[in-house]
Amino acid sequence: MRVLLAFLLAYPRRSLILLVALLVAGIAEGLSLSAILPLLSIASGESAESPMGRFVVSSVETAGLEANVTVMLVVIVGGMCVKSALVLLANRGEIHISLGMATPEEQEQIVRHMEAWKAADRTIVYACTSGYPVPFEQVYLREITTLQERYGSRVKEIGFSGHHLGIALDIAAVTLGATWVERHYTLDRTWKGTDHSASLEPDGLRRLVRDIRAVSKALTYKQTGILDIEVPQREKLKRLQSLHLN
């Protein structure tokens, strides 16, 4: 609170904007004061000490901006909008969340948010390595199994988001239990852009869908010892049921 009062005294003409922003944040379930106060401290000239503060300063400087009061107010309002959007999304339909670039702690926080908003039973989380394209050895397909163990009973389903080349790993992901597969697609993989090279062209997308459907049909258990399709072959090729040697 002391930091908040100091900020208001230092910037009296912006006090009304700040108060309105904080009011909207409270109404819309936006950023908490514990997240807002470090940003106000930075705007007042103090060094960034919290992890979030350091992240914001680094992002602002990367964008070529100065961490002043105006920029921090924009960050706060932007954070409120993102949080409000998440709350809105949590109120209806399925929610698909890629866990690329997220630490295990952040993944847990995401799932807990979904649980708090009574939306976990409509949430699909995706194992993902964020890169374009991702080398095969860095896709880490077994993360699908890890997510199933951690969150399989807490979210609706576990999916796989791939940024690799080809479609073989997507098929493997399905065999490991992924029930959703997300891939980027493009009309021409040689186009310039971040993810065209790791995307699928129309024919590649068609083959991916074809193969996933085929594998999904095959991932079942036998219902009987001898299947109907095996009976004619068994009649033709079976050995003698018993042979007695004296």
Image (tube, rainbow, N blue to C red):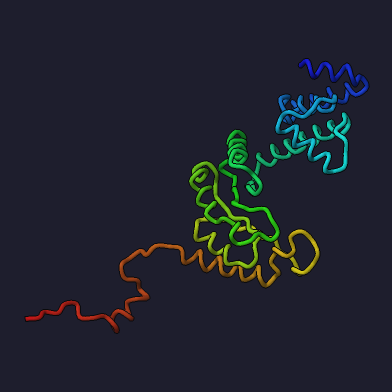
| Residue 184, above or below 56 | below
Q: Nearer the viewer, residue 38 or 225?
A: 38
Q: Residue at x 62, y 39 (%)?
A: 106
For the N terminus, which image quadrant?
A: top right
Q: Residue at x 11, y 79 (%)?
A: 244
For the C terminus, which image quadrant?
A: bottom left
Residue 227 pos. (x, y %)? 35, 71
Residue 51 pos. (x, y %)? 70, 33
Residue 123 pos. (x, y %)? 60, 45
Q: Quadrant of residue 199?
A: bottom right
Instruction: Report whether residue 96 is seen.
Output: no
| Residue 173, above or below 111 | below
Residue 180 pos. (x, y %)? 58, 56
Left or right: residue 115 versus residue 199 is left
| Residue 72, above or below 172 | above
Residue at the right extreme, as displayed: 13
Q: Quadrant of residue 8?
A: top right
Q: Residue at x 78, y 15 (%)?
A: 2
Instruction: Report whether residue 185 is seen.
Output: yes
